[in-house]
Image: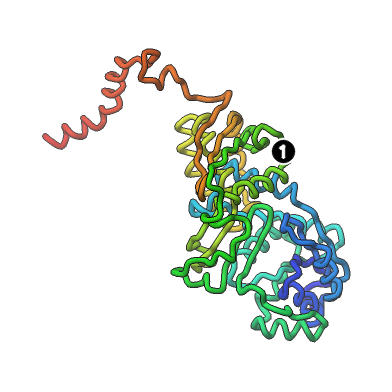
Amino acid sequence: MTRAKKVVLAYSGGVDTSVCIPYLKQEWGVEEVIALAADLGQGDELEPVREKALKSGASESIVADVKLSFVKDYAFRAIQANALYENRYPLGTSLARPLIAKVLVETAEKYGADAIAHGCTGKGNDQVRFDVSVAALNPNLKILAPAREWGMSREETIAYGEKFGIPSPVKKSSPYSIDRNLLGRSIEAGILEDPSTEPPEEIYVMTKAIANTPNEPEYIEIGFNRGIPTTLNGESKNPVDLIEQLNTVVGNHGVGRIDMIENRLVGIKSREIYESPAMCVLIQAHRDLESLTLTADVTHYKRGIEETYSQIVYNGLWYNPLKTALDAFIQETQERVSGTVRVKLFKGNAFIVGRRSEHSLYSPDLATYGAEDKFDHRAAEGFIYVWGLPTRIWANQGRS
């Protein structure tokens, strides 16, 4: 039975998404498949990917350059939120999915398609992110996920594709499943599925091994304007260049590696390896600048918001009303988060060694223990009496 006539497929050029093209047409009666590849700064030449989609049977193949939007509209918001899933993962892959979904929906509306398709399986997080994001942006579009339903093993999938002229991988050069964009790399599968096994050095590309990092520290200064990074070492940078240069500089010192047991949305624990040099340092520096420019109550309350925010993004709810409401709160907190943070990079570590801001709430006259001290020490006694009053009443009650 025909589920859709014209479909826009999220296309990566891999086996699953390539096989999706003939499968949708032959098995599900789709008349036309439009392939869409999003350029998120993968570092790969996407013209061969575009051509492969056409050879696989797509009626049209599109490459959308969304790098600038990816950084400005998604990564920078996550930095303002200090978004780290389970306090470790800076959400590089998670942030890409709602943007891809947005471009898929826009393309479907432009070409008059009645469905969106993707190559996600039933075990991962991405199926949720795509399905929910598409539904939020255009609930009238059907969502097709052939790989979630076809029940073929990888070998069977490759054999199916070969029947329609899709070449099988000549050689499986790596046993790992890797996703890469401007914000970093995620690596899983192979021997990494044993959580007790140390990751081999060969899996890392963006970060050097500690033994190969410079023997002298390097200092960098990151400038922020309203919580958004804008300068590196005093020079203004466009968003994409800033991320790319930081990835290189920070990764050169072995900073940005993450090895964690992650709780997937579908209920599975997964061993994940991430490389995310720029995002790790940017979030660390941004959080430090907030400690200088936000009041204590806002800082403490925002920390709880950040955990919720990270879970929302990870769980595929970027276009959820709660996410929109939290964005408004976070944007309000960023009005005075402007200044410069100095970072020392050395042997796999990023140390915050200095910070300054025109909106600093740090008062040397109040903080010092020297002769310049202007804090009224005598006022502390009255404060302590009022602060401790409920505790004393409780303690006295217990003695009666």
Residue located 53% across and 73% down the image: 191
Q: Position of residue 84 (x, y in %)?
A: 53, 50
Of residues 94 and 14, the one drawn nearer to the viewer in this rendering? 14
Residue located 81% across and 61% down the image: 108
Q: Position of residue 92 (x, y in %)?
A: 62, 54
Tally of marks: 1
Residue 151 makes an appearance in the image: no
Above/below status of 237 relative to 86? above
Of residues 135 and 283, the one drawn nearer to the viewer in this rendering? 283
- Specify the farthest residue to the left: 400
For the N terminus, the image quarter is bottom right
Locate residue 273: give its quadrant: bottom right
Residue underneath mark 1? 237
Q: Is residue 2 left or right of residue 132?
A: right
SS category of the residue bearing label 1: loop
Few, some or many residues within 10 Å of mark 1 (<14, 14–19, 20+): some
Above/below status of 173 relative to 132? below
Of residues 175 and 106, the one drawn nearer to the viewer in this rendering? 175
Residue located 56% across and 45% down the image: 281
Above/below status of 298 relative to 64? above
- Specify the farthest residue to the front: 215
Residue located 59% across and 55% down the image: 207
Residue 54 makes an appearance in the image: yes
Above/below status of 225 relative to 70? above
For the C terminus, the image quarter is top left
Q: Amino acid at mark 1?
A: Lys
Q: Is residue 181 left or right of residue 60?
A: left
Give the colour scheme of this rendering.
rainbow
Q: Is residue 117 left or right of residue 363?
A: right
Q: Position of residue 274 (x, y in %)?
A: 57, 59
Q: Position of residue 70 (x, y in %)?
A: 71, 50
